[in-house]
Amino acid sequence: SVGIAMGSALGAWAELLLLARLTRRRAVGLRPIGTIVAAPARAAALAFVMTAAIKLVVDPLPALLAAPIVVGTAIGVYATACHRTGVTEAEMLLRPARRLIWR
């Protein structure tokens, strides 16, 4: 299942880059794709490293206990990193979490 997820992610990035090249030729005045995806790409890289580290720590735990910890960490790190680097869509994910925390 990890291979399928990695293949899907790589396919999505390849499609994004190909579409960006096509639109850059046809639509003049758009921002370069590098400036658009730089912040989410850095956040994804950070989330990957943190998730891999957490996975190593919780590996001895049963899968039903380790999975929510790893997934929750990945989501939290990615959303926070996106928010800190200026990705406005991260607010959609963080707003409900803030409501739960700051009640």
Image: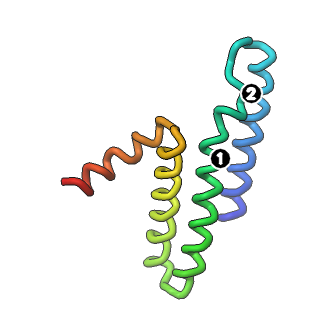
Sort mark 2 into few (<14), some (14-19) or many (20+) by Cα contacts within 10 Å: some
Which residue type does callout 2 highlight?
A: Ala
Where's residue 30, x and y in %?
68, 18
Question: Where residue 38 sits: x, y (%)?
Answer: 66, 40
Which of marks 2 and 1 precedes in the sequence?
2
Residue 83 is situated, as x and y percent measured from the top left of the image, at 47, 44
**Residue 29 position by quadrant:** top right
Q: Is residue 93 above or below residue 46?
A: above
Foreground residue, 62 or 81? 81
Q: Give the number of callouts.
A: 2
- Is the residue marked by circle 1 packed among few (<14), some (14-19), or many (20+) residues within 10 Å? some
Label 1: state its secondary structure.
Answer: helix
Q: Camera-side residue: 28 or 86?
A: 86
What residue is drawn where x is 49% and y is 72%? 67
Q: Which residue is mark 2?
A: 20
Rendered-image quadrant of the C terminus = bottom left
* Percent of width and height locating residue 11: 74, 45
User: Disc 1, disc 2: CB below 8 Å?
Assistant: no
Distance from the alpha carbon under mark 1 to that under mark 2: 15 Å
Any mark on residue 41, and which?
1
- Determine whether 56 is above or below 91 in the image: below
Q: Quadrant of the N terminus?
A: bottom right
Q: Secondary structure at mark 2?
A: helix
Q: Residue furthest left?
A: 103
- Tell me which residue sits at (68%, 23%) in the image: 31
Kindly identify the amino acid type of the residue bearing the numbered disc 1: Ala
Residue in view at x 58 percent, y 59 percent = 47
Disc number lying in front (1 or 2): 1
